[in-house]
Amino acid sequence: MNAARLDWPSWVVVPALVALALPAMSFATWITLTVAGTAMGMMLFLMASGLTLIFGLMDVLNFAHGAFITIGAYMAVTVLGAASGLVAADSLGLNLLALLAAVAAAAVVAGAVGWGFERVIVRRVYGSHLRQILITMGGLIIAGQLVIALWGPQPLLLAKPAALRGSFVLAGAAIEKYRMVAVGLGLIVYAAMHLTLNRTRIGLLVRAGVENREMVEALGYRIRRLFVLVFVAGTALAGIGGVMWAVYQELVTAEIGGEMTILVFIVVIIGGLGSVTGCFVGAVLVGLVANYVGFLSPKLALGSNILLMVAVLLWRPRGLFPVGRE
Amino acid sequence: MPERPLLTLADVHTHIGRYHILHGVDLLVPQGRLTMLLGRNGAGKTTTLRTIMGLWRASAGTVVFDAARIDRLETPEVARLGIAYVPETMGIFTQLSVRENLLLATGPKGFDAARLDNIFATFPALKEKWHDAAGGLSGGQKQMLAISRAIVEERRLLVVDEPTKGLAPAVIEHLIEAFQRLKATRTTILMVEQNFHMAKALGDAVAVMDDGRVVHHGPMADLAADEDLQARLLGLSLAAHQ
């Protein structure tokens, strides 16, 4: 988006943080933490990108977003469990095929549930933030119980595909292979979203709708249809993020999505509500800060994201890439 | 013989929340003419335009466009009948480029080269700023973009809310020329305006509103020539209209 391209101070934040971290640690540690932080950021971006569009375009506070992350995580358990042969095969291609199948299944199932959720629940509370918070929090709780009813209450172990386990050494630093996959997928999804938003009429409508829904309607477009489309896409993306996070954690519980909800909201707020580029930069920033602070000052790690959000909002009260809204 | 009305409002009432804003508006907008809607602040002019567009729902009365009722239609359906709306706030998408703002108002085939050339001839600044973010345009350029967006496709009716608001005199003269060009194409226009100089220069017909009703309608020339009538209808707000 044009405004995002011009807003250079916000673009400089991540490179500046990476450069500032280097003198505080050895080069190998710096590489390891930077890659780990970027990978975590990409997974956060996958989980949060849908939320920023839903928030930005529809003005809906969807606290049930974590439920779709949970759905993605359990689809990873189901699909990778069913494709255990591909997961265990000593072939990167077959491993990636299994992961791709899980990602596709999670996107379809989370998107379908998201469609039903929007049609049955969310559409009734447009325009009322309090009711949105109450009803979507309720949705999150119900979804958690449904997951327990379907998959059981016990935590489920999830093995990474064989070729994606372990690490390789780069410039003396250990780099986890799976993290590179997460970085790759995050970049692909960001590029796809960027192209869709900037090169297609649907994307143009979404960007316009984030700014002024009423004017989009006055131009003859049915914004409610766009809402459904964005909600489905947003929940499908959360499902994809859930797969990647679950495989990274190798342990899935019914709370996996709920635990990420606050972090996902922090990313969206830091980036600027409704901005996909802001969400991308915000997610990487959160991932890097969590890793650097976790290494340098472990006692501060728990609160580091809240402190980051406070610092960003003091500097930029509407986030790093604010979207003008009417 | 009077022109056939393209748009007719009959006894239209509009409530916003618990406030009763329009108290039975009757208005005829003749085909191919520019109708000015005047009145003091708070008289209900903007509410009338928004009610026509379906942005606020009429609680009683009828809005008829080309012999069909439109007061129960959703805003996108009203727009698809060929009614373009330029709101008081201009409704520019500031994060989008000038090109993208205009593209959103085109049909599936995109830009019509002849219409675009005509827009560039009227508003050369838009050609220069074609790929720039609309948020960086001056107030006058934003208004030019808002008007261009309304005419980038063929429309049957333009509904324009106070296009001169906050603009410099030189820009207003430019807009008057632009609307005179539009009038020459027999485009039907309903315009709310506070600037009486602009209203006199452009209006064919005029309706004056007060307290949520139309209290006068007739030829603009009659109102322009009758200072007593101006003082009576526009009264205390006359200074603001000059």
Image (cartoon, coloured by chain):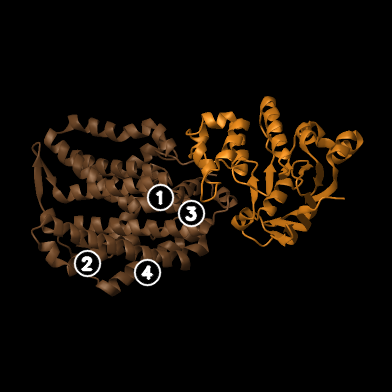
User: Which of disc 3 and disc 4 is earlier in sequence?
Assistant: 3
Q: Nearer the viewer, mark 4 or mark 3?
A: 3
Secondary element at image label 2: helix
Q: Which residue is mark 1?
A: A52
Residue at 69% of width from left, 53% of height from top? B52
Secondary element at image label 1: helix
**Chain under numbered label 1:** A
User: Which of disc 1 and disc 3 is earlier in sequence?
Assistant: 1
Residue at 57% of width from left, 38% of height from top? B116
Both on one chain, marks 2 and 3?
yes
User: Which of disc 3 and disc 2 is earlier in sequence?
Assistant: 3
User: Which of disc 1 and disc 2 is earlier in sequence?
Assistant: 1
**Chain under numbered label 4:** A
Q: Nearer the viewer, mark 2 or mark 1?
A: 2
Query: Which residue type does callout 1 highlight?
Result: Thr
Q: Which residue is mark 3?
A: A58
For label 3, count other residues whose C-alpha is less than 10 Å away and answer few (under 14), some (14-19) or many (20+): many
The x, y position of residue A28, in whole percent, is 12, 36
**Chain under numbered label 3:** A
